[in-house]
Image (cartoon, helix red, strand yellow):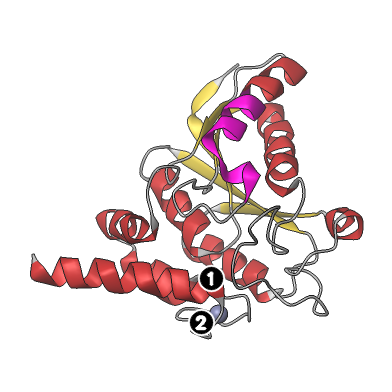
Amino acid sequence: MKNKKQAVVIFSGGQDSTTCLFWAKARYEEVIAISFDYGQRHKKELECAKAIAEEYGVEHHIFDLSLLNELAPNSLTRSDIEVDHDAPETGTPNSFVDGRNMVFLTYAAIFAKQRGITDLVTGVSQSDFSGYPDCRDVFIKSLNATLNLAMDYEFDIHTPLMWIDKEETWALADELGVLDVIHDKTLTCYNGIVGDGCGNCPSCKLRKKGYDRYMSHRNKK
Ligand code: ZN
């Protein structure tokens, strides 16, 4: 039995996936959030995810994927590797975790199918393209086809943020009535500071630039 009334959201507790969580909550009768523990430097990220899910009554599961860190050490999990501040001219930045989105979506799909759920939601975006190949639309479409073939099932992967930038992601949060929730309770900072973050890491800068732009346009309206 296929169930279009439920969706599984890949949820990290950051700005993008939390916006997607509320996007899904506005569209589906029931939303289930899943997070992965892959040895992130900041366990705080998972704590944020847990707190948000609890507060909004969302069923939430955290799955252990520490193997990912063992196989692909990277600057998000290893404190001895400093996060690249700019994308390198060739190759991927050292904050890229090989295979991460593929593995996350694959496990999400396996989980969803057991419950007869077809719809998966992920916050990947190709607009602020930071050199992550698995955030591109072509990859998501390809994986969707592969998962369908792998499990003989009709998955539907939704990517509400694919074509919008950070400013528009803030606008979407506002539209969904959760601008403050996203602003105050999510964690995107590479230094593990909730909300506004450290202000200096590449992730904070991107987030703040989008927020300031959105707020200045919003105030002019
Ligand atoms: Zn930061």
Which residue does the image show at 50% across and 75% down from the upper left? 204
Please name the residue that numbered disc 2 is placed on. 197
Q: Secondary structure at mark 1?
A: helix
- The reply to whether the C-beta atoms of the residues labelled 1 and 2 are less than 8 Å apart is yes
Q: Is residue 160 above or below residue 178?
A: above
- Total labels: the figure holds 2
- Relative depth, front residue between 161 and 107: 161
Tell whether circle 2 marks a residue whose Cβ is less than 8 angstroms from ligand 1: yes
Q: Which mark is residue 203?
A: 1
Quadrant holding the N terminus: top right
Q: Comparing marks 1 and 2, which lies closer to the viewer?
A: 1
Q: Position of residue 165 (x, y in %)?
A: 38, 54
Left or right, 9 with reference to 219: right
Evaluate whether residue 187 shows in this view: no
Would residue 105 be visible to someone looking at this image? yes
Crowd band around label 2 with a 10 angstrom C-alpha radius: few (<14), some (14–19), many (20+): many
Query: Looking at this view, is 148 or 112 the one in front?
Result: 148
Residue furthest to the left: 221
- Horizontal side of 65 relative to 120 (left or right) equals right
Three-letter residue code for mark 1: Ser
- Looking at the rendered image, the quarter that the C terminus falls into is bottom left
- Residue 92 part of the magenta-drawn span: no
What residue sits 62% from the left and 75% below the top? 190
Under mark 2, the amino acid is: Gly
Q: Is mark 1 within 8 Å of ligand 1?
A: yes
- Spot occupied by residue 125 in the image (x, y as percentages of width and height): 49, 47
Which segment is the magenta one?
A: 132-144
Residue 49 vertical position relative to residue 68 in the rendered view, above or below: below
Q: CA distance from mark 1 to mark 2?
A: 9 Å
* Up-down relation of residue 4 to residue 211 (above or below): above
